[in-house]
Image (cartoon, rainbow, N blue to C red):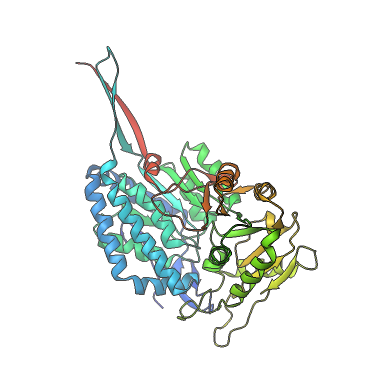
Amino acid sequence: MVAMKMQINGKAAGSCGGECFDVRNPATCELLEQVPRGTEEDVALAVEAALSAFEGWASISPQQRGMVFYRAAGLVRQRKEELAALLTQEQGKPLAEARNELEGFSHVLEYYCGLAGSLRGDFIPVTGNGYSFTVKKPLGVCAAIIPWNMPALIMGWKIAPALISGNTFVLKPASSTPLTNLTLASILNEAGLPAGVLNVVTGSGEIAGESLVRSPDVRKISFTGESGTGKRISELAASGMKRVTLELGGSDPMIVCDDANLESAVAGAIRGRFYNCGQTCTAVKRLYVFESVAREFIRKLEEGVKRLKVGNGLDKDTDMGPLNNHSQFEYIKELVAGIEEKGEGRIIAGGKAPSFKGMGKGYFFEPTLVSDVPGDSRLLKEEVFGPLLPIVTVRNLDEAIEEANRSIYGLGASIWTKDLDRIRMGCEQLNAGIIWVNQHLKVAPEVPFGGVKESGFGRENGPDILSEYLETRTIMLKT
């Protein structure tokens, strides 16, 4: 088997002659690749390469940088089937979802290509002091640590605004899903990204990730992942006065009012919870339904969930693939096993790890619905990253919002209703960074995205994110 290699200085470097880790297919547990376990020295080399490339990359026009993105987006679309198969094999999601994610990556590149011409300062009239104006300068070397659930899309979210602003970059992918990230980095190089502008270092969070955060030459860290790790990164970054963006955990509530279109709400709940096997930060993780429509809604939801086909993501008719890794699999099994014995609800659909002939020891778990969930249940307090949906009945919108806001998280929320007053109330009172109305889950690169409370701080996406990767320099001129 040929080992994958890290992209350092835009070229393959390092090998599995040293310590490596395995990348396995979560549907079969078969070995896909061995990838270098990056060391502190590897991180230092990557940062050094980015630092060396910075002046040259920052000196070219934003429009020239944007054209690299434009070409890369086209190449990704040309190779979408090949890339989707790779993404499915390492992450587990169905091919349709993998294609959708890669299309999203291309769209992100094209969006920031379109923003290239908006990088400019301001003229500030100051009476009696001549002329004053500002210019925008890139920070230098930036870095990101990304998760395994949406590796291609989140890579795009991190690198695109940083690179279009003239910064160089070091990316640390998740240990279970580095292959698509390495391939996308190679495609960007092929599209004309100069050597050293984007560097990928594979390895553990404890060594490669922490070394990256500690590096004195890294000026900004962007992290997507769980809240405990985010707090650790924030502490380490503070000592170096680094800028930080943290997109952390979420426990998104979905509120279904008694006037909602139940067919649409059921479809939204199924997609919002079980897309990517429930492994999405903004997935529907808590469902609050008005008691007057709860029986009908739950019946329709149960029927829809039981129609979902669980299987290998490479199979054409698969609706939901496996969990990504053994740790998540064991967590979901343990959580579900204790639901009824601890009085945390009643399992009305799923609840088991099915066995699939010919698929080896994959991390499959049935889409699971739990009704009659009490307010103090773990299912409502923790971020459940998997195909498990707790259902709570409420009397009215006041109660629904009160229960929704009890969480320590505040990433996203949705309200399903036709009533404008209820929409206004939900949008004003739900404590979340993004609120959907009669929809859930979709996040476009054109809009700011991020959370409140323990879901982190800072925002991804949208035009305002560019300011996070630029310094403002004020110039006062008197002739």
Q: Quadrant of residue 273?
A: bottom right
Q: Quadrant of the N terminus?
A: bottom left
Residue 196 shown left or right of residue 279 in the figure: left
Residue 247 vs residue 196, the one in the foreground: 247
Residue 400 shown left or right of residue 196 in the figure: right
Name the spot of residue 150 as percent of width and height, x first: 47, 62
Q: Quadrant of residue 87?
A: bottom left
Q: Which residue extends farthest bottom?
A: 357
Name the spot of residue 59 as percent of width and height, x first: 23, 42
Asked if residue 150 shows in the view, the reply is yes
- The answer to whether residue 55 is above or below residue 270 is above
Residue 84 shown left or right of residue 372 in the figure: left
Name the spot of residue 18 as percent of width and height, x first: 45, 66
* Residue located 39% across and 41% down the image: 464
* Residue located 39% across and 52% down the image: 445
* Residue located 31% across and 67% down the image: 77
Q: Quadrant of residue 418?
A: bottom right
Asked if residue 201 shows in the view, the reply is no
Q: Quadrant of the C terminus?
A: top left
* Residue located 68% across and 56% down the image: 380
